[in-house]
Amino acid sequence: VSSEGRAFDQVTGELVRKLLMYIGGSNEQDEAMGTAAPIIITVYPRNDGVLSRRLVVGIRIPSIYQQSPPTPTDSAVRIEERPGMTVYALQFGGFAGESEYRAEALRLTRTLGETAPFQRKQYFCCSYDPLKPYGRRNEVWFLQEEP
């Protein structure tokens, strides 16, 4: 699912709920697929580090459904096949919103250094347990550039 025009903290909860409904059985086959993690939010930072108002939220469909995933009933939910990728990752805990992900992305950038081969036009904000009130696991991923 995707959104344009609304800020990260305004829209992520709504988009994540759409995906959780889909994997929970709101699909044409009424198939509950169990839990899937992480929730991956693709963000597009501006040159100053502020996130643009465009983002894409995705979740990995459990392995047994990947060959033939249930058809979404919500037209905002799309099935997309992604190739394998190599990422640089930084894990952190707590409740993460836009400011936390931005701070951790800056920390990962500093850790890697300015010459590290990663894409700077987008990065991924990941949450492994968004429904837990405490003890959350989050990550920032930078996609490695091809050598």
Image (spheres, grey):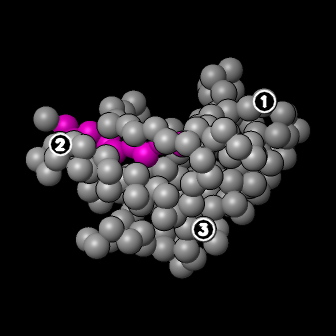
Residue 78 at least partly seen: yes
Please tell me which of labels 2 and 1 falls first in the chain: 1
Residue 42 at least partly seen: no
* Residue 20 sits above or below residue 18 on the image: above
Q: Nearer the viewer, mark 3 or mark 1?
A: 3
Give me the C-alpha separation between circle 2 and circle 1. Answer: 36 Å
Q: Amino acid at mark 1?
A: Gly
- Name the element at disc 3: helix
Q: Which mark is residue 117?
A: 2
- Name the element at disc 1: loop
Where does the image place residue 63, in percent across and percent down from the top left? 63, 22
Q: Nearer the viewer, mark 3 or mark 2?
A: 3
Q: Which mark is residue 73?
A: none
Please tell me which of labels 3 and 2 falls first in the chain: 3
Q: Which mark is residue 34?
A: 1
Identify the image quadrant of residue 141: top left
Q: Amino acid at mark 3?
A: Asp
Task: Please give left or right for residue 28 compared with residue 128 in the image.
Answer: right
